[in-house]
Image (tube, helix red, strand yellow):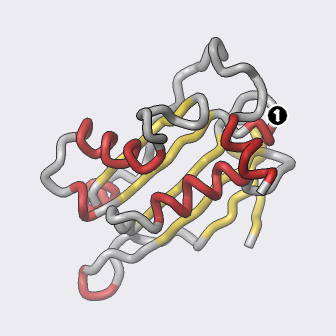
Amino acid sequence: MLRAFHLASVTRKVLSVPRASVVGTAGRPRASHRAVAMAGGAVGPVQEHIHSTVQGSELKPVHLEVENESHGRHEDESHFHVLVVSESFEGMTPIKRHRAVQALLTDDTGKLPFHSLRLTTKTPAQYGVDPSAPAAPKCTGKGDGRGPSDLAQELKQQ
């Protein structure tokens, strides 16, 4: 289901399960997942790949958001923010949480198939207290080629 909303002067479309409390009945986590696309576009193949990879992982996220933050054309799919809420993060340091998510998305050489990955990783308790994510830093665009990522091109050809 698509609905439009206004965020930071950019209209975005959200493909989502309506977000409710992360805690469901009997104190058990309730799963919710969404992918956020830039204005004028649907969720792209790289974004869908990130979403399905993390969602199907051993992290078993109770809440997952994947946002295309690419600053060029929507189809570039070069910059992403991923918010993951998982019980698996209990007792892990923030850097270990980030490494666990990043390991799901890197290739055999440890390289991401796109330019930028911004992660917010929380436990259900942390997300229940504060569901926000820090604002994205300004990207200079150096090194990203200002074009579709290799993975975006590869997934479009499939």
Which residue is at the far bottom?
A: 26
Q: Give residue 148's position: percent from left, percent from top.
A: 76, 34
Q: State the SS at label 1.
A: loop
10 Å crowding of disc 1: few (<14), some (14-19), many (20+): some
Which residue is at the far right?
A: 40
Count of numbered badges drawn on the protein: 1
Which residue is at the far front?
A: 108
Q: Give residue 112's position: percent from left, percent from top.
A: 51, 35
For the C terminus, the image quarter is bottom right
Q: Residue at x 68, y 64 (%)?
A: 15
Q: Residue at x 53, y 30 (%)?
A: 136
Q: Give residue 10's position: percent from left, percent from top.
A: 75, 39
User: Would you say residue 5 is visible in this rendering?
Assistant: no
Q: Residue at x 55, y 53 (%)?
A: 50
Q: Residue at x 25, y 64 (%)?
A: 87
Which residue is at the far left?
A: 91
User: Would you say residue 45 is visible in this rendering?
Assistant: yes
Vertical relation: 74 (above or below) 158: above
Res 22 quadrant in image = bottom left
Vertical relation: 137 (above or below) 86: above
For the N terminus, the image quarter is bottom right
Q: Is residue 149 left or right of residue 41?
A: left
Vertical relation: 60 (above or below) 151: below
Closer-to-camera residue (64/58): 58
Q: Type of residue at label 1? A: Arg
Instruction: Tell me the residue that label 1 is attached to.
Output: 73
Closer-to-camera residue (22/44): 44
Vertical relation: 39 (above or below) 29: above
Q: Is residue 65 left or right of residue 88?
A: right
Q: Give residue 85's position: percent from left, percent from top.
A: 36, 58
